[in-house]
Amino acid sequence: MLSGRRLDLLDPTPVDIEIEDIAHGLAFVARWNGQTKGDFAYSVAEHSLLVETLFGRMYPTAPMKWRLAALLHDAPEYVIGDMISPVKAAVGPSYGELDDRLTAAIHIRFGLPAATPKRIKAQIKKADKISAWMEATQIAGFSVTEANKLFGRPDPKVIEGLSIRLRPPVEARNDYTARHIELLAKM
């Protein structure tokens, strides 16, 4: 890792996890395999910031630790990349196991339970689907009708005033790191 840490992907430990490595990696991983409009790829870091914002709007009384879990929901992708769902399914259960091991190490490193409770995971997934709907309609070329079929129709109040931001990776990295620090300070 850029921090100098050595991360064993098959046996990750919390002491090998640094937020700067996560933020940097996610800022350079493109969502939608880079098949989006604009001058910059839409990064997983940017997506994660949006998911955390949506989660906060949907569940305003949720403890800060679950907002942090929302921000970190795709954190393993800093080293394993973002694979579209059909590819994950084709790879099989070994992908999920690798993702789970990395998630556990990341969560423990930042004071979260190794496994996110099912109810919270479902809430984060709901915010994730709304983010995917926004991405699909704003930068990935999907019609609203198409996105509604794939991701469900979002509550207009939840997405009001939000839009997809395409910007240089360094900005997404810095904002991801800053938001992580803010959430940790509120826990």
Image (cartoon, rainbow, N blue to C red):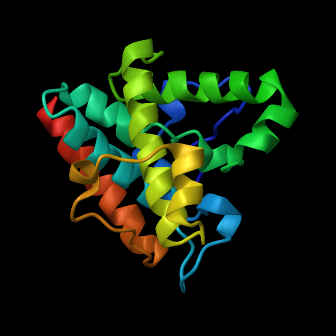
Q: Where is residue 186 in the image (x, y as percent from the top left)?
A: 13, 35
Across and down, in percent, residue 71 comes to: 37, 42
101 relative position to 75: left or right: right
Which quarter shows the C terminus? top left
Q: Residue at x 57, y 65 (%)?
A: 28
Q: Report the number of discs.
A: 0
Judging depth in this view, the residue of 92 and 128 nearest the camera is: 128
Q: Position of residue 173 (x, y in %)?
A: 41, 63
User: What residue is at 49 percent from the left and 37 percent from the top?
Assistant: 17
Instruction: Give the residue displayed 85% in from the left and 34% down from the top.
Output: 91
User: Which quadrant of the view contains residue 7?
Assistant: top right
- Left of 71 or right of it: where is 142? right
Residue 124 position by quadrant: top left
State the residue lying farthest toward the front.
145
**In the shown orientation, is residue 58 left or right of residue 6?**
left
Residue 18 visible, this angle: no
Q: Which of 42 and 145 is in front in this view?
A: 145
Q: In this view, does 116 lie above or below 35?
A: above
